[in-house]
Amino acid sequence: MKTLVLGLGNELISDDGLGLLAVRKLKEENGTSAEIIECGLCGMALLDILVGFDRAIIVDAVKTGREEPGTIYELNAEDLGPVFAPSPHYSGLPELLDTAAQLGLDFPSEFKIFAMEVADPYTIGGGLTEPVAAALGNLVAKIRTQLERWERTT
């Protein structure tokens, strides 16, 4: 089974770079057969990246304001509802999955989303805030655990 770990974000914008830094750390630690990709894209631009994989882990930063920065959310694709955005050009993962199905694309049948509550996904420069940087290792460990779980089932 072909597995992808996709880190999303922009490391030039404070905590928004979390997904990129997490997958980079995972790659440096080695020990996985999964393909690891850092990506600054979102929405429908992810279609081409996800095609051809059986399983995918998506790693990203979120700011809900409901939890403390550093809180890690583990979600399945089914846990996500439609995204209501101010622009009709924006699409989230549910819309992406629906489009892939309608087009008959060879898309992952299993998705796991690891998102971390962040403090500041808006400020240009400065790197990760303290609570997010402190939780980075825990996030990478959770991703590795999921990969190991999948590898045991193949």
Image: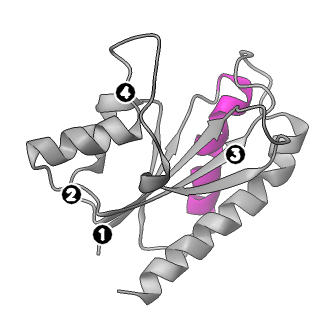
Q: Which comes sooner in the sequence, label 4 or label 3?
A: 4
Query: Which circle, 4 or 3, is nearer the viewer?
Result: 4
**Residue of label 3:** 116
Q: On the rendered structure, is 32 left or right of 130?
A: left
Extent of the magenta region:
12-28
Q: Secondary structure at mark 2?
A: loop
| Mark-to-mark CA distance, 2 and 1 | 8 Å
Kind of residue at badge 1: Lys
Q: Secondary structure at mark 3?
A: strand
**Residue of label 1:** 2
Q: Nearer the viewer, residue 63 or 49?
A: 63
| Mark-to-mark CA distance, 2 and 4 | 21 Å
What quarter of the picture does the N terminus occupy? bottom left
- Whether 30 is among the magenta residues is no
**Residue of label 4:** 91
Q: Which comes sooner in the sequence, label 2 or label 3?
A: 2
| Circles 1 and 3: CB atoms closer than 8 Å | no
Q: Nearer the viewer, residue 75 or 133?
A: 75
Tell me which residue sits at (25%, 42%) in the image: 98
Residue 27: which numbered mark, if any? none
| Mark-to-mark CA distance, 2 and 3 | 27 Å
Kind of residue at badge 3: Met
